[in-house]
């Protein structure tokens, strides 16, 4: 199967649109199911805001996307779904607010068979702003041929360069080693592998390089380094932002291993694991300000803070032993404030102040999601803003700096009592995806969120962030 025949784009509120030179592979139906089609014409029930979890749809009602709530919205399918992905930093500049946008991603698939999996590098480009609503769409349909040509030029584009990978990819993270982009990935086969992404990046950026990649290179690419010492599969994985090439990996047998870069593209993996957890290690996060400190969370319901300067058996310095009611699935360390964000199987989001961590008490708690939390991440430049994804098919955006305005909210709640149950810090609820697994803010495109789900990838920016 030719790798360039895998990707398709779908724009919300419109028909599926395929990238030039790319053919669909059966993932179109999944994309179509996610599109929230608009209701009929005039005379229908007036629009109103739907609050997930607080009300149910009545017979004959359906959810309709409000395009005015999005600055940017695109969907893409890549064949087999991806549990995990990461944003690849690029040299196109920081704080990019001009459209169309270009983003580079790295992802690994969870295919039906081990042999069918791929390590993918994607270039998503020509990402234009979302239209302002159905009226503008209607006007566009009745436009002349010149405007139709312009619409063709606005279609999003997707370039893929894929490498065969034996086994599904549980988690993947990207870092820079000098000018080289590399990815570390956890395989369901129990190995952690590191790949050089340079050939794939060249392929998605140049059509001739892509042809060379497909003919000669894709089947020849092998890991730079691999480690099978965990003896089981895992999910926890994080690169240090303070020490180039330093890596942490955690497995389902409660062990955490420290990797330090060696010479000649190799790594030294400390065979003495950090072992204070009693069950599977679910996520790891290096401190953004202290090179020797990291945090972990586990199925044992705890969050732990470690210092690698101590011997592994004594490295656990702080612990919140009952951080959630059950499994703690994901954590994110704030890059600007001494906060850690956690999400658990209980559907709860909690904020932990590291200055008070030894008390074992969180400083904030939110219960908007109705199913386990699958991904959390602080905004890369705004220390009060965060995003979360859940198994309830919701992505939520939050701003801790927002405070309740009693007078204004009293008037609003009188009109709609359900608003009283919504925390003022909740900015936005994004829906329309199925089985959301992971999300990331794009560090160079302000407000842009990217997510992966069973239904494919979403790239969007809301009016709230």
Image: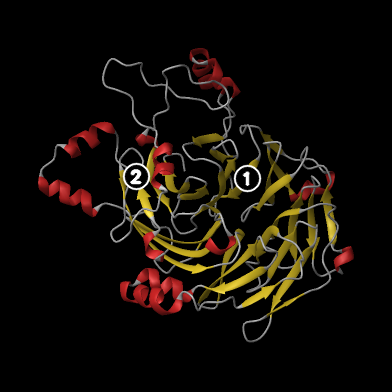
Here the colouring is: secondary structure
The residue carrying mark 2 is 11
Outermost residue, right side: 314
State if disc 1 and disc 2 touch (CB < 8 Å): no
175 vs 235: above or below? below
Image quarter of residue 404 = top right
Image quarter of residue 284 = bottom right
Q: Residue at x 42, y 27 (%)?
A: 63
Kind of element beneath mark 1 = strand
Rate crowding at label 2 as few (under 14), some (14 to 19) or many (20 or more) other CA atoms within 10 Å. some
Query: Of callouts 2 and 1, which one flags the residue occurring earlier in the amino acid sequence?
Result: 2
Q: Residue at x 55, y 25 (%)?
A: 405
Q: Image quadrant for the N terminus?
A: bottom left
Mark 2–mark 1 distance (CA, rounded to whole Å): 25 Å
Tell me, for residue 98, which label it has, or none: none
Q: Where's residue 185, x and y in %?
A: 61, 65
46 vs 1: above or below? above
Q: Residue at x 74, y 59 (%)?
A: 251
Of residue 151 and residue 25, the one placed in the foreground of this image is 25
14 vs 177: above or below? above
Image quarter of residue 97 = bottom left
Specify whether 382 is left or right of 65.
right
Tell me, for residue 374, which label it has, or none: 1
Q: Is residue 391 visible to us here?
A: yes
45 vs 134: above or below? above
Kind of element beneath mark 2 = loop
Specify whether 62 is left or right of 184.
left
């Amino acid at each position: 199967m030719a790798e360039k025949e895998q990707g398709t784009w779908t724009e919300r509120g419109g028909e599926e649109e395929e990238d030039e030179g790319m053919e669909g592979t059966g993932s179109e139906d999944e994309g179509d199911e996610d599109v929230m089609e608009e209701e009929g014409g005039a005379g229908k029930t007036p629009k109103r805001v739907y609050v997930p979890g607080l009300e149910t749809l009545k017979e004959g009602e359906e959810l309709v996307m409000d395009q005015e709530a999005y600055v940017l919205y695109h969907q893409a399918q890549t064949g087999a779904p991806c549990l995990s992905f990461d944003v690849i930093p690029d040299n196109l500049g920081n704080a990019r607010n001009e459209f169309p946008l270009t983003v580079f991603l790295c992802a690994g698939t969870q295919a039906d068979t081990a042999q069918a999996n791929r390590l993918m590098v994607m270039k998503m480009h020509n990402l234009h702003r979302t239209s302002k609503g159905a009226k503008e769409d209607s006007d566009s349909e009745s436009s002349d041929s010149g405007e139709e040509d312009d619409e063709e030029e606005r279609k999003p584009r997707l370039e893929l360069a894929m490498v065969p990978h034996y086994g599904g990819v549980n988690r993947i993270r990207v870092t820079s080693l000098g000018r080289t982009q590399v990815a570390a990935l956890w395989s369901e086969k129990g190995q952690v592998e590191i790949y050089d992404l340079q050939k794939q990046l060249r392929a998605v950026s140049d059509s001739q390089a892509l042809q060379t990649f497909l003919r000669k290179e894709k089947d020849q690419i092998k890991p730079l380094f691999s480690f099978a010492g965990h003896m089981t599969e895992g999910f926890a994985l994080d690169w240090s932002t303070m020490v180039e090439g330093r890596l942490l990996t955690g497995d389902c047998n409660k062990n955490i291993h420290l990797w330090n870069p060696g010479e000649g593209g190799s790594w030294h993996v400390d065979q003495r694991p950090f072992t204070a957890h009693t069950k599977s290690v679910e996520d790891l996060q290096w401190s953004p300000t202290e090179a020797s400190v990291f945090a972990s969370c586990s199925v044992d319901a705890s969050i732990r803070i470690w210092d690698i300067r101590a011997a592994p058996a004594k490295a656990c310095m702080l612990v919140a032993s009952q951080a959630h009611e059950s499994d703690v699935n994901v954590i994110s360390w704030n890059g600007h404030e001494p906060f850690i964000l956690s999400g658990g199987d209980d559907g709860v989001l909690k904020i932990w102040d590291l200055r008070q961590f030894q008390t074992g008490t969180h400083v904030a708690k939110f219960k908007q999601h109705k199913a386990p939390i699958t991904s959390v991440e602080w905004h890369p430049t705004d220390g009060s803003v965060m995003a979360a994804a859940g198994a309830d098919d919701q992505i939520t955006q939050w701003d801790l700096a927002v405070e309740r305005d009693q007078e204004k909210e009293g008037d609003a709640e009188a009109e709609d009592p359900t608003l009283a149950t919504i925390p003022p810090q909740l900015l936005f609820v994004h829906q329309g995806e199925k089985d959301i697994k992971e999300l990331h803010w794009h560090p160079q495109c302000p407000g842009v969120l990217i997510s992966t789900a069973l239904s494919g990838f979403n790239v969007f920016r809301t009016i709230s962030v």
